[in-house]
Image (cartoon, grey):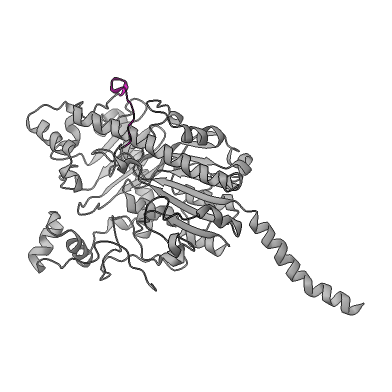
Amino acid sequence: MRVLIAMMLLCLPLQAAIAEEADTDNRPNILWIIPEDVSPWMAAYGDETVQTPALDRMAEEGVTFLKAFANVPICSPVRSSLMTGRWAVSTGVHNHRRSRDSKGRDAIYLEEGTKALPSIFMDNGYETFNIGKDDYNFVYNRRDLYSAGPDEVEGHIGDKNGPDFPWEKLAEGKPFFGQIQLRGGKARGKVDVELDSSKIDMPPYYPDTKLFRKRWEDHYRSIVDTDAEVAEIFEKLEASGEADNTAVFFISDHGFPMLRHKQFLYDGGVHVPVFVWYPNGQKQIQKYGSRRNELISTIDLSAAALELAGIDIPDYFDGRSLFGDAIEPRQYVPLSRDRGDFTFDQIRAVRTDKYKYIRNKYPDVPYMQPSYRDGWPVTKEYFQLKKEGKLTPEQALFIADTRPAEELYDLDADPHEVKNLADDPTYASVLARMSSTLDGWILISGDKGQVEETETEIAAVVARWGDKCVDRRCVEYRAKYGDEEPAGATGVIQEGK
């Protein structure tokens, strides 16, 4: 009898482990669909110019976040933020395409104890994968982030489907955290979609020309194309039998790739569509409603993904709970923009429900500095129209030779953000309050962008971009040291490869 009892006691840990594993197997899959450069021009946000049935379904059956904002309007900083759950300026990933230099001159390492989101999922028994671009500004080994990938290549960089990678089958063994990247707005409207151009209202800050209007129309076409890709992903997920137990997030990295949108802190650059769809977790995700109007930052979605998986949100996360029992709504969302490619800048902003406050560190530098967009036909036309004096005051704001040190907008009265109230004495108290709020956030975030890039870091910019960089920093560097040999133009540092 004693032997039997002893054997039973020995079996208890094994039985507990089996029970725990069974519970683990029932945890939801988390799937992020991340299109590039997509603004919320869709029915769920009140725009019915084009039909988006797959996204409409996500909105109708899941949750729509109506006021979601990217903390940076540039690809790599905001994607890095999604991976860390932190503000880009807090971890030092705020400048575009850091940690690509093969000599390590601009390398950013995450602080000890800080783990990227996929690694947290891996530590908790999840398979992880990424299909498409990653574009992170910190040093990492893809194999530490992603456990599976097409052709046995972890952290695959390629098209949205990979080479027939059966990502949906990962859940047969464990739950998965996966990311599928879509071209989104960068597809530039290659699909053939009939549009009634007369129903498209051009914003007052752009000239209403054929070229500008086509760019607008092409973004709608890109959204239709993105919706079709989302439908394909859902079809694959449902065929696997895993759809009900998968929380699907649709998150654009930032807004429409246009002159005053992407790379800038107006709503066109940072307001993004966000949907969360999860049949088995319907009660949890709709606890606060299916159309949520509170302000959120997209880094809150990093916290929400862990939350739905039953994983504790790390203390170092700046992202906040969205589906918990005691959520803490944001009173404002902070926004930042620093160097993009070879264009140096520093812009900070805070957005509340009613107001937007923007601070430009370099008011003597035009918004339209030399950049990768200079070859676009719309850019060339914009400068030509300025030269010919054919722009309205609103259209000329963004192409002026200088810019204001501060900008303040009443978003209710002026949703296009063209009437700057910073010098209006009527709004002096609002300006002071918003400015103080920004100062406070800069302090608590440990904003690393307040410190200029070092000469060593600028060497990496010169090595990558050569004479394309005409900023004074690059000019002064080349005058002092000469040109740098090209180094690390693509890819990332991969330790332990």
- Can you see residue 428? no
Instruction: Indicate left or right for 224 with 479 as reference.
Output: right
Secondary structure, magenta segment, majority class: loop
Q: Residue at x 34, y 32 (%)?
A: 220
Compared with 165, 282 (above or below) is: above
Q: In this orientation, which residue lies closer to the viewer: 356 or 415? A: 415
Compared with 42, 345 (above or below) is: below
Give the extent of the magenta segment: 191-200
Q: Residue at x 47, y 42 (%)?
A: 232
Quadrant of image for the N terminus: bottom right
Residue 407 sits in quarter: top left
Instruction: Indicate left or right for 372 with 234 as reference.
Output: left
Compared with 94, 197 (above or below) is: above
Quadrant of image for the C terminus: bottom left
Residue 382 sits in quarter: top left
Instruction: Indicate left or right for 122 with 465 as reference.
Output: right
Magenta stretch: includes residue 473? no
Q: In this orientation, which residue lies closer to the viewer: 329 or 176? A: 176
Q: Residue at x 60, y 51 (%)?
A: 28
Compared with 355, 78 (above or below) is: below
Q: Position of residue 74 (x, y in %)?
A: 31, 48
Q: Position of residue 188 (x, y in %)?
A: 29, 39
In the image, farthest residue toward the bottom: 3
Q: Position of residue 48 (x, y in %)?
A: 40, 25
Residue 111 sits in quarter: bottom left
Magenta stretch: includes residue 198? yes
In the image, farthest residue toward the right: 1
Q: Position of residue 395 (x, y in %)?
A: 19, 29
